[in-house]
Image (tube, grey):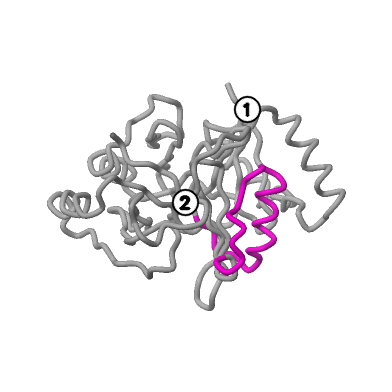
Amino acid sequence: MPAKLNHLAITTDHYTQLGMFYRAIFGMKSSGDTARELSAISVGDGYTGMTLIPRRAGRKAGLDHFGIQVEDVDATRVKCEKKYPDIEFVKRPGNRPFTSYGCHDPAGTYFDLGQQRDKNRAEVYAMDGWKQDNTISHFAMRAREAERVAEFYQEIFGLEARNERTEEGGYQLTDGRVTMIIQPWKISSFNGAGIEQPGMDHIGFRVPSIAGLKAHIANVVQQNISLSPKPIDFDSEGAARLALLAKCPMGTWQLADPDGTPIDVAEDA
């Protein structure tokens, strides 16, 4: 069985606002555990959980990392250390609701590693799965040596390659529900826009109707303007960044959350 791509994390100065945004706009659910949510808020779609982390001094805001759930963390560590001896595993503090270890791929992109039986499993990660109309479909990263990075996730975690269109030199890997897109990082990709470091790029949702989502957003914003998506193409640099985001093959409409994290949306097939 392949591992599960069922965790994302955003670091933000406005974690309560983002928690309400993803609940109000995409119908995601939270555990409602106030004591835990003083530290961070996790929301989920019944499969993938997304933790919104208050930004501390020295940390960058934005889409921070993702997480992989495996059946046996120790066995995965042994497998990885044999093939990739330069990969490090670090034990994470016990207050994390998803993970037991932190790890990185050959390009240095950090991800969490957990298993269902971890004692610290909590919030939406410990709740029984549920079905809802809007779900997370994918997330994307940009990496140097994209081919080597894709091989790593296939070899160690059993993710399957999708033979679908992507940017030249890119890869799509899936656990059967969520897709990881690995795009090659090229400085020329950001021509006309602000240059971004290699790393996490955007998240994607499937919805029943984009027209319906747009109408719903308008209704939510009418009630609370602070939940309005952040404009992307307000100037020429933003337009260039939006054009780059629109190259993702898994979405047809793009927006950003109130903190600026890019979101790619597609209708259910």
Foreground of the two, 238 or 134: 134
The amino acid type found where label 2 is placed reads Tyr
Residue at x-position 38% and y-position 58%? 99
User: Which residue is outermost to the left?
Assistant: 82
In the image, taking residue 63 as reference, residue 89 lies left or right, namely left
Start and end of the magenta stretch? 9-36
Q: What x and y, as percent, mark residue 104?
A: 32, 57
The amino acid type found where label 1 is placed reads Glu
Residue at x-position 54% and y-position 75%? 56
Residue tagged by mark 1? Answer: 267
Residue at x-position 58% and y-position 38%? 205
Q: Quadrant of the N terminus?
A: top left
Instruction: Answer above or below: position of 266 versus 186.
Output: above
Q: Secondary structure at mark 2?
A: helix
Q: What x and y, as percent, mark residue 152?
A: 26, 45
Query: Which disc is residue 125 wearing?
Result: 2
Q: Quadrant of the C terminus?
A: top right
Separation (CA) of disc 1 from disc 2: 26 Å
Q: Secondary structure at mark 1?
A: strand
Q: What x and y, as percent, mark residue 16?
A: 66, 63
Residue 117 in sight: yes
In the image, taking residue 76 as reference, residue 109 lies left or right, namely right
Tell me if residue 59 is in the magenta stretch.
no
User: Which residue is outermost to the right?
Assistant: 222
Foreground of the two, 89 or 62: 89
Tell me if residue 33 is in the magenta stretch.
yes
Residue at x-position 75% and y-position 31%? 212
Instruction: Answer above or below: position of 139 versus 52.
Output: above
